[in-house]
Amino acid sequence: MKLLIPILFIFLTLFTGCSTEAVDVEENPLEGGWKLTTWTVGIPVDLNNDAVFSTNLIEEIPCEAMEMLTFSVDGTVASNLTFNPNVMISKNEALGVYVYQVECETEGSIGFAASYAHKGSSVFINDREAIINGNTLTMVYKNAQKVHNMAKTDVLETKDITLVYTKQ
């Protein structure tokens, strides 16, 4: 019996000294909701007449921007509401001034679901690359916005559309 007590003591010490903490699994920094906070073509405008020029159309137009990307651990990203205004940009070549015509989507929303892959600072959504930097996700659509002449008969130039999402 005298030998049993020291053995039990050693046995209990060994088991209570072991850590039972879970293995630290790397979290997916994308998982969760990302709200669209910037939609820009890089041209400063004051469409809401508040005397503040901004390149972010979300701040300048009355269209409701409720777009949210939701990334899941299963490798899918979905959005039930997309920010989809109809933006027509013309350029007065004589004055070097851009003129915007914007119509908000009122017929409903466009949704989508897609697969994604995360590699370093890049996120590939159906093979389209976005860059994650801290709590922002930036996606660039190269030459996606046409700029027409005032008669809307010719395309004078194209601009990149840049979307920035902020982690919620």
Image: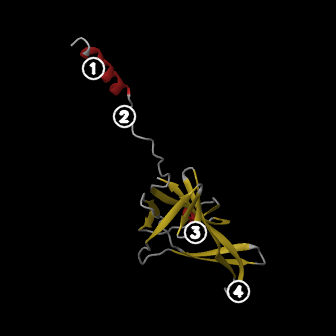
Say above or below: 23 vs 147. above
- The quadrant where residue 59 appears: bottom right
Q: Residue 140: x, y in percent?
A: 62, 66
Q: Nearer the viewer, mark 1 or mark 4?
A: 1
Give the farthest residue toward the top.
Answer: 2
Name the element at disc 3.
strand
Q: Which residue is mark 1?
A: 8
Going by the image, does 80 lie left or right of 103? left
| Kind of residue at badge 1 | Leu
- Quadrant in which the N terminus appears: top left
Q: Which residue is mark 4?
A: 154
Specify which label sits upstream in the sequence, 1 or 4.
1
User: Which residue is found at the position 51% from the left and 73% from the top?
Assistant: 84
Task: Characterize the local packing of mark 1: few (<14), some (14-19) or many (20 or more) Cα atoms within 10 angstroms.
Answer: few
Numbered tag placed on residue 163 in the rendering: none
User: Which residue is found at the position 54% from the left and 59% from the top?
Assistant: 118
| Kind of residue at badge 3 | Arg
- Is residue 48 at all visible to an observer of this figure? no
Say above or below: 57 vs 2. below
Q: Which residue is mark 2?
A: 20
| Kind of residue at badge 2 | Thr
Measure the alpha-carbon separation of dots 2 and 3: 42 Å
